[in-house]
Amino acid sequence: MKERLYIFDTTLRDGEQAAGCQLSTVEKIQIAKALEKLGVDVIEAGFPASSPGDFNSVVEVSKVVKEPVICALTRCLKSDIDIAVEALRFAKKKRIQTGIGTSDYHIKYKFGITRGEVIRQAVECTAYAKKFVDDVEFYCEDAGRTDNEFLAEVVEAVIEAGATVINIPDTTGYCLPEEFGKKINYLKHNVKGIDKVLISVHCHNDLGMATALALAGVENGARQVECTINGVGERAGNTALEEICMILKCHKQIGVDTGINTKYLVKTSRLVSNLMNMPVQVNKAVVGRNAFVHSSGIHQDGVLKNRETYEIINPKDVGADKSQLVLSARSGRAALKSRLKKLGIDVTDAVSIDGIYAKFIRLADRNRYITDDDIIAISGQDIKDVKSVSILKHKVSSALGEGAKAYLKLLVKGEEREAEATGNGPVDASIKALKKIVGDDMTLQEFTIQSMTRGSDDIGKVYMQILYNNNLYYGFGASADIVLASLKAYIDAVNQFI
Ligand code: KIV
Ligand code: ZN
């Protein structure tokens, strides 16, 4: 029987501290509901003493969340704890996290007090919080740079005062994973009462090691990991929830299990990214757009023979649609044949595939991105015969301050259909016209525009992600006209489910 590792999500507190990622109460509620569905054990909903807005968010999140524990952060101040108690009044299960800096950097430069005074305040605040809630977590800020002997003294004192969870943060992401693992091990063997409490690790990503640090903590006895969706957080961020959960799922020998329903990882990642207005790094482990995209011919050939040749995670396990092969100048015949087959273009004889491949490579060397429309054209087919939805005519007009108007004529499964719509800009108007034709029961989840080079005459690339029937579909469009590229991307996604 595997041991349980508790997932403490701090997207709404440490995650929201990331510059430019502030969330409103309504947005926090949306994320909290998604985190509950994902199966996190604890939601750190905010730092109520920091602002009336954050206080209100903790109140409202407490009202809607039933299963996870709701945690509120405080400094080692009775006034902060009073405010947290008030903010948590509706929570079904509640926790207060209080703490103080324990490294000499904090003691000397931030507080200008003695180590003895740190212990006195730590004990006083833990005992004070304990008067209001049973579940008290104590954090030793900058524990990563605190010497182990003093850290053990602080931890022993706060356990004595009633702490139930001990949080050991590497606040500056400074430690090496092995060193951090040894720190947890040291506490396990040198603190009286440590077996009665849960050890938590909270690691930052300043040297790109936040997940490795948390893992080292788990391997040495920590049974709670504090993490955020997409690894967002102060400065370079925190341990990414999706990474730690998938590491433990892929490496069963570690012997711990989380209660995370990993099928919701990608969806939750997109929600957080959209609401925080913080794009997910394309090559981000587990949830990045390229996490299951294979580009080189050798890899594509392998994946077509057996997905596991180049994938250690099944995309379906994290809620990503499927593995994808992109066509580029590095692709081989196997990927081209597979795409032709997917498009329903029947090319069986070697002579024709050689001919199409030669044209494809010439185009790919020039274009970098090859779309389905390109493949259809070089194989001598008509797009209308291959795709369920194709554009026949598209016109937009817009004027400064007056919004925009779009006219669209599509061929939908052989039938010509047209619509007009207005919107706050040409893309909005075009997509509204499209939805009038193909249906309104889909929502845009991600919309990214990139230019290929730098000039104003450049080709624009648009990536979109559409949610339809609870499934996510990716679409790609490229054109010198960015409105048309957007429309093409939307239609590319729609073609996958229509
Ligand atoms: O990084 C840190 O030390 C923190 C604490 C407040 C838990 O975020
Ligand atoms: Zn932190």
Image: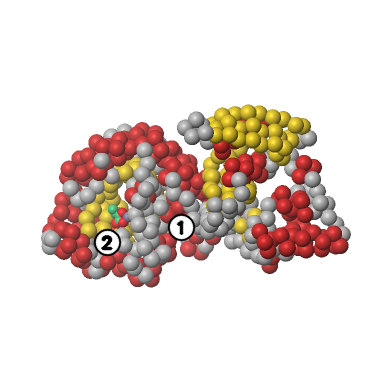
**Residue 408 found in image quarter:** top right
Residue at image point 85% right, 59% down: 352
Q: Which residue is mark 2?
A: 142
At label 1, the amino acid type is Ile
Residue at image point 56% right, 29% down: 422
Cα gap from disc 1 to disc 2, whole angstroms? 21 Å
Residue situated in front as seen by the camera: 87 or 404: 404
Residue at image point 31% right, 60% down: 171
**Crowd around label 1: few <14 · some 14–19 · many ≥20 (10 Å):** many
Q: Where does the image place residue 386, in percent across and percent down from the top left?
A: 77, 44
Of the numbered discs 1 and 2, the one sitting upstream in the chain is: 2
At label 2, the amino acid type is Asp
Residue situated in front as seen by the camera: 468 or 461: 461
Secondary structure beneath dot 2 equals loop
Residue at image point 79% right, 59% down: 356
User: Would residue 493 appear left or right of 36 to someone viewing this image?
Assistant: right
Q: Which residue is mark 1?
A: 244
Q: Is mark 2 within 8 Å of ligand 1?
A: yes
Residue 283 visible from this viewpoint: yes
Q: Where does the image place residue 123, in percent across and percent down from the top left?
A: 17, 53
Image disc number at residue 460:
none
Q: Where does the image place residue 26, in percent across and percent down from the top left?
A: 39, 35
Secondary structure beneath dot 1 equals helix
